[in-house]
Each structure stands twice: as C-alpha cells, then as structure tokens.
Image (cartoon, helix red, strand yellow):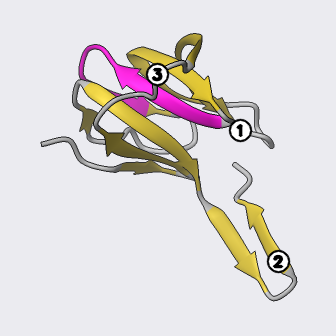
Amino acid sequence: MRQTIHQGDVILEPIKEIPKGAKFLRKNIIVVGEITGHAHEIQDAEIYEKDNVLYVRVIEKNPMTHPDHPATKVAEKGDRRVRIQMEYFPSGERQVKD
C-alpha cells in the first residue's frame, strides 16, 4: 500500500492517477527550495503539472532525497499529488520556505 510521504515542506499524497491532460515537466526534481536552491527529488520519477498542481509518477521505487533532510521511506511505484506545507498566522497563511 502506498503511503503519504513527507520531507521538509513537501508532502506527496497517493492518488489513483495523474489527471488527464497533465503536462510533463521534467524527471526526478520535484521542487527546488526557495531559500537554499536545493532540490527534493526521487530518482526514476516523472513530474507533471495541471492547473498549477504538481504530480509525481514514481516509475521505480526510491526514497525522496534532499541535501538538508534525511531520505524518506521508499516511495512505491505509482502516482502522487504534491502539496507544499503551509504556515498559518493571524494575518494569513504562507508556504513554508525550505
């Protein structure tokens, strides 16, 4: 069973499939940190986008890696939606900066 994977500000939630019409963006690099420029990545993965939402297709199981965080559990083959953790303040919310 595929699990939700969390590393730093990046959360990967299992989904049944990537939406039809999603555009292929790149391989392996999921997102790049706004502060450090370091990448969250999974080897043997494809990154897609539709309606400003990122999706990951894991082709071969591998952990998500990042130079500033420990590697995650192995991401099983399958599709996932990418979510960026939010911080909440009385004045509003913002994305966590990594």
Horizontal side of 74 relative to 55 (left or right) equals left
What whole-number distance in Å separates the C-alpha atoms at marks 3 and 1? 28 Å
Tell whether position 54 is magenta: yes
> For the residue marked with disc 2, what is the amino acid?
Gly
Rendering coords of residue 22 (x, y %) = 55, 21
> For the residue marked with disc 3, what is the amino acid?
Lys
Disc 3 is placed on an element classified as: loop
Q: Mark 3 Cα within 10 Å, few/some/many (few <14, many 20+)? A: few
Q: Is residue 88 visible?
A: yes
Horizontal side of 78 relative to 56 (left or right) equals left
Q: Against 90, is 95 above or below?
A: above
- Residue 20's label in the rendered image is 3
Q: Which residues are magenta?
A: 53-64
Rendering coords of residue 61 (x, y %) = 24, 22
Rendering coords of residue 69 (x, y %) = 50, 45
The residue nearer to you, when weighing 47 against 73, is: 47
The residue nearer to you, when weighing 98 against 83, is: 83
User: Does the CB distance between marks 2 and 3 fall below 8 Å?
Assistant: no
Report the residue marked by disc 1. 33
Report the residue marked by disc 2. 92
